[in-house]
């Protein structure tokens, strides 16, 4: 599928390819959605991708999968978990500021953000019964230890969140979808079974996120979640894009050619989201004089649109 070049300096170029009814990615989220996210730790968003956009993304995923399989980077059963995939296709770069999903990123985390972790997942049907495993975890690795409080009732900071784009049909359980425990982002620990050599039941309250092609879900990195086994005859295809604060180091390495077309097509906001900054203090949201840097692309965009809000700490 041929995709016209996106050249808009503000990211509205989606309208040149896919119809999102004039959405720009700078429409504020509702107080209802923000409240649900803070209470449940995740949000399921329906019909985030138009069908032609979803199909184009799936085509791009299939191409990348074929390239990786040819290189021998898939597992024995054909599973691919590819980190830092964004620069592999123009369509992936555009996802950074998707007109429906992006407002949740800056609306829930603010303007001083970038993508530190993103992965492309292809999970074929399981070829054989899976051995016992316990996959429940919170994202963030040492972020769950280094800033730990001695008070077990005081939740750790969010630090990051992800948006997951669903490209295949996950409308029924058993298709390898992500499992979550709503509200568990406020728990610093989760009881672990004593014997991991046997199959253990999922924790009480577990929900498998069933979603249609083109849906997306957003989750707090602290949300206790787990993969599940693909017991169906459908190959699971997902794209995950994580956002964190610019003063946190990247987890994945992007391999961006600064002289290439992919980088040339990125808007100023998208370049910020890929990690660009003018100096070290800039990543902390300030100039060297100690004042907020109003030229940081996403802050500048939100300020020009009247979307900064002093009642919301991360949008001050």
Image (tube, grey):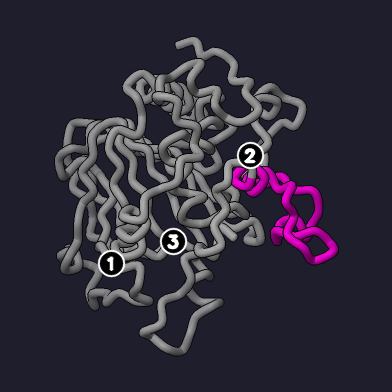
Dividing the picture into quadrants, the one containing residue 52 is top left
Q: Please give the name of the residue rendered at 21% of the width and 40% of the height, measured from the top-left corner.
A: 175
Dividing the picture into quadrants, the one containing residue 215 is top left
Q: Please give the name of the residue rendered at 51% of the width and 57% of the height, measured from the top-left corner.
A: 109
View extreme (top): residue? 2
Q: How crowded is mark 3: few (under 14 residues within 10 Å), some or many (20 or more)?
A: some
Which is closer to the viewer, label 2 or label 1?
2
Picture coordinates of residue 220, whole percent (x, y): 40, 59
**Residue 80 in view of the camera:** no
**Dots 2 and 1: beta carbons under 8 Å?**
no
Left or right: residue 147 compared with residue 19: right
Q: Residues within 10 Å of mark 1 (few under 14, many from 20)?
A: some
Counting residues from the start of the chain, the first of labels 1 and 3 encountered is 3
Q: Please give the name of the residue rendered at 25% of the width and 62% of the height, measured from the top-left corner.
A: 182
Alpha-carbon span between mark 2 and mark 1 = 32 Å
Left or right: residue 119 compared with residue 113: left
Counting residues from the start of the chain, the first of labels 2 and 1 encountered is 1
* Highlighted magenta segment, given as a residue range: 275-303
Foreground: 118 or 316? 316
Residue that mark 3 sits on: 139
Q: Please give the name of the residue rendered at 28% of the width and 50% of the height, measured from the top-left corner.
A: 178
Disc marking residue 273? none
Disc marking residue 183? 1
**Residue 129 in view of the camera:** yes
Alpha-carbon span between mark 1 and mark 3 = 15 Å
Residue that mark 2 sits on: 269
Left or right: residue 270 compared with residue 130: right
**Dots 1 and 3: beta carbons under 8 Å?**
no
Picture coordinates of residue 180, whole percent (x, y): 27, 58
Q: Is mark 2 on a helix, strand or loop?
A: helix
């Amino acid at each position: 599928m041929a995709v016209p070049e996106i050249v808009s300096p503000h990211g509205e170029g989606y309208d040149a390819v896919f119809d999102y009814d004039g959405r720009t990615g700078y429409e504020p989220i509702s107080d209802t959605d923000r409240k649900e996210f803070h209470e449940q730790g995740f949000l399921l968003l329906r019909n985030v991708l138009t069908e032609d956009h979803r199909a184009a993304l799936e085509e791009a995923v299939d191409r990348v999968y074929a390239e990786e399989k040819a290189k021998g980077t898939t597992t024995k059963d054909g599973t691919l978990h590819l980190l830092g995939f964004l620069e592999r296709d123009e369509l992936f770069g555009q996802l950074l500021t998707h007109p429906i999903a992006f407002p949740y990123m800056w609306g829930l985390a603010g303007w001083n953000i970038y993508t530190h972790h993103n992965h492309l997942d292809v999970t074929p049907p399981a070829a054989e019964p899976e051995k016992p495993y316990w996959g429940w975890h919170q994202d963030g690795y040492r972020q769950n230890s280094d800033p730990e409080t001695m008070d077990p009732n005081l939740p750790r900071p969010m630090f990051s969140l992800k948006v997951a784009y669903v490209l295949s049909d996950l409308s029924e359980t058993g298709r390898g979808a992500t499992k979550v425990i709503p509200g568990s982002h406020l728990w610093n620990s989760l009881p672990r079974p004593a014997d991991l050599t046997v199959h253990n039941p999922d924790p009480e309250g577990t929900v498998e996120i069933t979603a249609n092609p083109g849906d997306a879900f957003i989750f707090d990195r602290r949300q206790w979640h787990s993969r599940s086994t693909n017991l169906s005859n459908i190959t699971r295809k997902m794209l995950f894009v994580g956002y964190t604060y610019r003063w946190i180091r990247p987890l994945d390495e992007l391999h961006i050619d600064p002289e290439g077309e992919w980088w040339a097509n990125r808007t100023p906001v998208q370049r910020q989201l890929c990690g660009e900054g003018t100096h070290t203090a800039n990543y902390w949201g300030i100039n060297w004089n100690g004042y907020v840097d109003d030229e940081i692309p996403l802050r500048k965009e939100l300020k020009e649109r009247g979307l900064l809000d002093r009642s919301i700490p991360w949008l001050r």
